[in-house]
Amino acid sequence: MADDDYVYDDVTGEWRPASEVAAAAAAATRVEVRDSAGNVLADGDSVVLIKDLKVKGAGQTLKQGTVIRSIRLTDDPEEIDCRHDTIRGLVLRTEFVRKR
């Protein structure tokens, strides 16, 4: 839609710019991802493991206190995508991490 297009907003009962309505709809569907302590996580944050985790398929254990840098959020608010030095494509549950 162009910037000069207006749409009727049923919630407010007013004609509003289409870009405003689209931005409000996107903000309403956005889900907050929180760590084990309740802190909000964002793309690029660093997290610390709060528990030893056995990694399936890698035959390795990530120890408590391991720092994971540059996380990426997924569609699931309870999982984050990240990389470790030796493990690529690692997906961690947010209940086992704390924001650094």
Image (cartoon, rainbow, N blue to C red):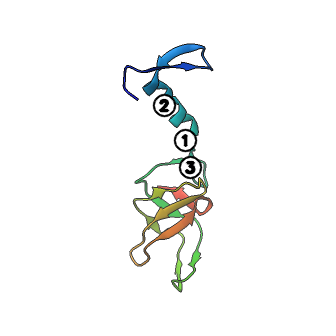
Between the residue at mark 2 and the residue at mark 1, the CA separation in whole angstroms equals 13 Å
For disc 2, the marked residue is 22
* Mark 1 Cα shell of 10 Å, populated few (<14), some (14-19), many (≥20): few
Name the amino acid, label 2.
Ala
Mark 3 touching mark 1, by CB under 8 A?
no
Question: For mark 3, what is the residue?
Answer: 33
Residue for point 42% across, 68% down:
83
Identify the residue at image location x=54%, y=41%.
30
**Residue under label 1:** 30
- Give the Cα distance between marks 3 and 1: 10 Å
Comparing 15 with 29, the one in front is 15
Residue 59 in the image: above or below residue 88: below
Q: Is residue 30 left or right of residue 69?
A: right
Q: Quadrant of the N terminus?
A: top left
Q: Position of residue 89 (x, y in %)?
A: 46, 71
| Left or right: where 75 falls relative to 18 | right
Q: Nearer the viewer, mark 3 or mark 1?
A: 1
Residue 64, horizontal then vertical, whole percent: 54, 70
Going from the N terminus, do you reach mark 2 or mark 1 first? 2
Identify the residue at horizontal 49%, vertical 63% (top origin): 81
Judged from the image, the secondary structure of the residue bearing numbered disc 1 is loop
